[in-house]
Amino acid sequence: MRGNIDKFIVVGDRVLIRPKSNDNKTKSGIYLPPGVQEKEKIQSGYVLKIGPGYPVGPPPQSDEPWKEDISTPQYIPLQARVGDLAVFMQNSAYEIEFEEEKYLVVPHAAILLLVREDDELEYYLK
């Protein structure tokens, strides 16, 4: 199912998503041509991997010599987590195929909504 995506390194503010399987037929049983689904503007799928986040520039130089210089890249983390169901703008997604599986690379800014099955979420809804 997951193929070998452990080799993937998602960069920046991007998210790797496995699209939810879309049925090619309507509720009444009519089969739709592929072009109809491609015209939909919103799509959903499950988050498999996330990038480190939005890159942040280096901190200003300090005049205090005892402070440690930070030379590693710094990032603002993303809201998405592995396992979330993401609802996103389809026209911003890039489709890739790896080992006969289709995946989508989506910028975090194109995600409209995240659905998280989590105990924390239930706490805030009470």
Image (cartoon, rainbow, N blue to C red):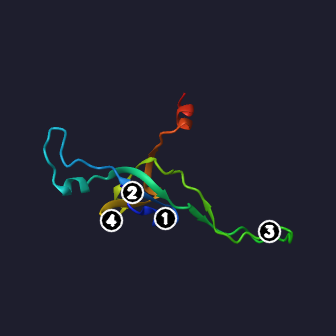
Residue 62 rendering spot, x and y as whole percentages: 80, 70
Residue 8 visible, this orientation = no
Q: CA distance from mark 2 to mark 4?
A: 9 Å
Residue 68 got which mark?
Answer: 3
Q: In the image, what residue occupies the spot 49% across and 51% down?
A: 82
Q: CA distance from mark 3 to mark 2?
A: 41 Å
**Mark 1 or mark 2: which is in front?**
2
Callout 1: few (<14), some (14-19), or many (20+) C-alpha neighbours within 10 Å? Answer: some
Q: Quadrant of residue 57?
A: bottom right
Q: Which residue is mark 4?
A: 99
| Outermost residue to the left | 30
Q: CA distance from mark 1 to mark 2?
A: 15 Å
Callout 3: few (<14), some (14-19), or many (20+) C-alpha neighbours within 10 Å? Answer: few
Dot 4 or dot 1, earlier in sequence: 1
Residue 55 rendering spot, x and y as whole percentages: 59, 65
Amino acid tagged 4: Glu
Amino acid tagged 2: Arg
Dot 3 or dot 1, earlier in sequence: 1
Label 1 residue SS: loop
Q: Which residue is mark 2?
A: 2
Label 3 residue SS: loop
Q: CA distance from mark 4 to mark 1?
A: 17 Å
Nearer the observer, 115 or 119: 119
Amino acid tagged 1: Val
